[in-house]
Amino acid sequence: EVQLEQSGAEVKKPGESLKISCKGSGYSFTSYWIGWVRQMPGKGLEWMGMIHPGDSDTRYSPSFQGQVTISADKSISTAYLQWSSLKASDTAMYYCMSCHHWGQGTLVTVSS
Amino acid sequence: QTVVTQEPSLTVSPGGTVTLTCASSTGAVTSGYYPNWFQQKPGQAPRALIYSTNNKHSWTPARFSGSLLGGKAALTLSGVQPEDEAEYYCLLYYGGAQRNWVFGGGTKLTVL
């Protein structure tokens, strides 16, 4: 059974850094792209970017280029999404998706 | 900036048929955009329904079908059930220089 297990909810202050994770199981982790998706409160889905864990080829949506970093550690079948300096506008639910399956989401709240 | 457009909202009666569409600001949507469709219910992660225009997943109910219609990607629900009330999102792939995916704004489907 394909599963994508995301890390738990986070509450951070503006300016802090953060790295959230998505662990894949039940499929060949290095064979499928993993995408990250943002959903701001009450809004639609936004494609942020994706990584191919097999060769670490990474692509970003223009809106998110330079704002976040996507990475993966294939030795532990885990992908990451990170911020170096969070803003209040980063408050959202973040989903990973791969192999036609979705993680359960990680809620990130940024507030002073 | 590429924009993918969906109907903001549609209403259908139980047992009826409804078609949701997905248009690209770059021109006609073809199979080369690998249209995907997702369903999201309140408080839940999205769920994949259709990939590569018209391919269903093992869990996709038979009443859902995907196609290309008049230069757009389309999702048709035949014999709509009350549990089909949800938000539906399309996702298109842009190759070439972009090499990335873009979500549509979503369609809120009401079953009434």
Image (cartoon, rainbow, N blue to C red):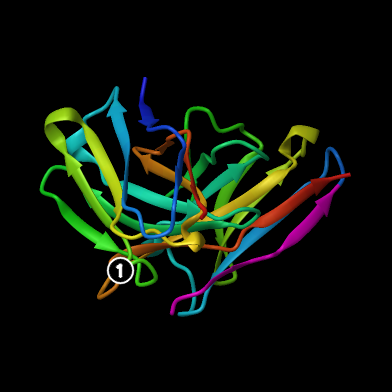
| Residue B92 falls in image quadrant | bottom left
Asked if A48 appears above or below B59 in the picture, the reply is below
Image: A7 above or below B104: above
Whether residue B24 is situated above or below residue A2 in the rendered picture:
below
**A78 lies left or right of A99:** left
Residue B82 position, x and y percent, is 80, 34
* Near-viewer residue (A5 or B29): A5
Residue shown at 17% from the left, 37% from the top: A30
The magenta span reads: B1-12
Pick out the residue farthest to the front.
A112
**Which corner quadrant of the image does residue B21 belong to?**
bottom right
**Mark 1 highlights which residue?**
A65
Residue flagged by tag 1: what amino acid is it? Gln
The x, y position of residue A9, in whole percent, is: 46, 36
Depth check: give the residue in front, A35 or A91. A91
Report the side of B1 relative to A99 (left or right).
right
- Mark 1 residue crowding within 10 angstroms, few (<14) / some (14–19) / many (20+): few
Q: Residue at x 39, y 42 (%)?
A: A97
For the point 64% across and 37% down, the residue is B43
Residue B70: which quarter of the image? bottom right
Magenta-span inclusion, residue B47: no
Q: Position of residue A3 (x, y in %)?
A: 37, 26
User: Residue at point 48% right, 69% down?
Assistant: B29
Q: Chain of mark 1?
A: A
Q: Secondary structure at mark 1?
A: loop
Q: Quadrant of the C terminus of chain B?
A: top right
- Residue B5 is inside the magenta segment: yes
Total numbered badges shown on the rendered structure: 1
Which quarter of the image is occupied by the N terminus of chain B?
bottom left
